[in-house]
Image (tube, grey):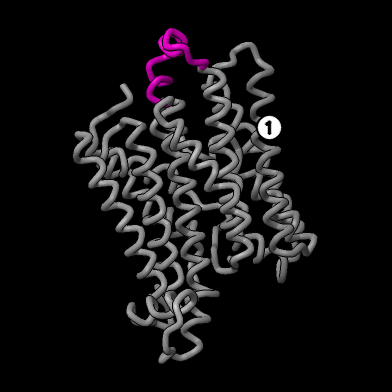
Amino acid sequence: MKRGRFLPTLLLMWVGVLVVLLASLCLGRYSIAPQTVLRALVSRFVPIIRTWDPTVETVVWQVRLPRALAAALVGAALSSGGAVFQGLFHNPLVSPYVLGVSSGAGFGAAVAILLGASAAVTQASAFATGAVAVSLTWLIARSGRDRSHVTLVLAGFVVGSLFSSLVAGAQYVADPSTKLPQIVFWLMGSLASVQWADLLRAVVVIVPCLVVITVLRWKLNILSMGDDEARSLGENPAAMRVVLIGLTTMTTAVSVALSGVIGWVGLVVPHLARGIVGPDSRRLIPASIALGAIYMMIIDDVARSLTMAEIPLGILTGIVGAPVFALLLRRSRSDWD
């Protein structure tokens, strides 16, 4: 894509984010007209005559807005992480969960639920064990003779399998009538219980990380040329990988702590973005952030509106993601050869 076309395309994507956000505030079992939603939003900042039911303001401000923003934040974090990892490892099948983050975070959340911890403690536990999982992955990869990024991916699979087994053990000992359903529902992914405090805790970590990733996105193009070329340009490829992996892992761990385990987002959305703006990381990362926010908000809208009982997000992302990814692989020409 030419530079002159990218900026209008990116602007259109962010307009799409706002449109989907507004639609998310309108949709649900209690439907609200768009003009009423806009007036309810504006009324918090500008004194206007309230002609709507007080329930509208509660639904918009306390239920749907934090949830929609959380969906956008998680989608942006996971999709940008997928774009970074696919560029970093030069592999189209890599996702943010490749270093064992999801399995580690899932184990921490499962243990917290078993102990009857609060939602905040559950999120903190998920983040902590996700960080532990990545640290173990890093230590295993660095302890061998071959310290390439392929070894890091393999170490991630090992650690992920270990924590997946621990999660299964936690499910086995959980009370089948109380704790087990909570663990299973959390592992499937949900934003049903997100409140402003939960969103704020995620924002203070994810947003700065996304800003830094966006600023450093051009370095992914340098890394794609190989370590020797990167060194000849005055860059330290090992240090760049550490920084980018650390930032991406942090955003992924916080996302999992907020929403549970949601697969396919970091795998599918970067491919969608690549089909629109091309493989250049300077354009791919911002496009992935915007498309990820749109994608995740739409998935969440479907999850809470399609049936009377809310559908776990992980189920929908798998149902949608698998065929979409297969179609993308069939139609796209390879940028990885």
Q: Quadrant of residue 14?
A: bottom left
Q: Is residue 271 magenta?
A: no
Segment colored magenta: 220-236
Residue plotted at (75% across, 65% down):
175
Q: Count the marks: how many?
A: 1
Residue plotted at (56% across, 51% down):
255
Q: Nearer the viewer, residue 203 or 113?
A: 203
Residue 168 shows in the view: no
Task: Check disc 1 and report the residue beneath it.
Answer: 135
Q: Quadrant of residue 37?
A: bottom left
Q: Is residue 280 above or below residue 127?
A: above
Q: Is residue 35 above or below residue 323?
A: below
Q: Is residue 181 above or below residue 142?
A: below
- The x, y position of residue 208, in whole percent, is 54, 44
Q: Nearer the viewer, residue 299 or 170?
A: 299
Q: Is residue 232 magenta?
A: yes
Instruction: Give amino acid for label 1.
Output: Ser
- The x, y position of residue 331, in whole percent, is 22, 39
Badge 1: few (under 14), some or many (20 or more) residues near its Cα, within 10 Å? some
- The x, y position of residue 115, in whole percent, is 80, 60
Secondary structure of the residue carrying numbered label 1: helix
Q: Nearer the viewer, residue 67 or 6?
A: 6
Q: Quadrant of residue 285?
A: top left
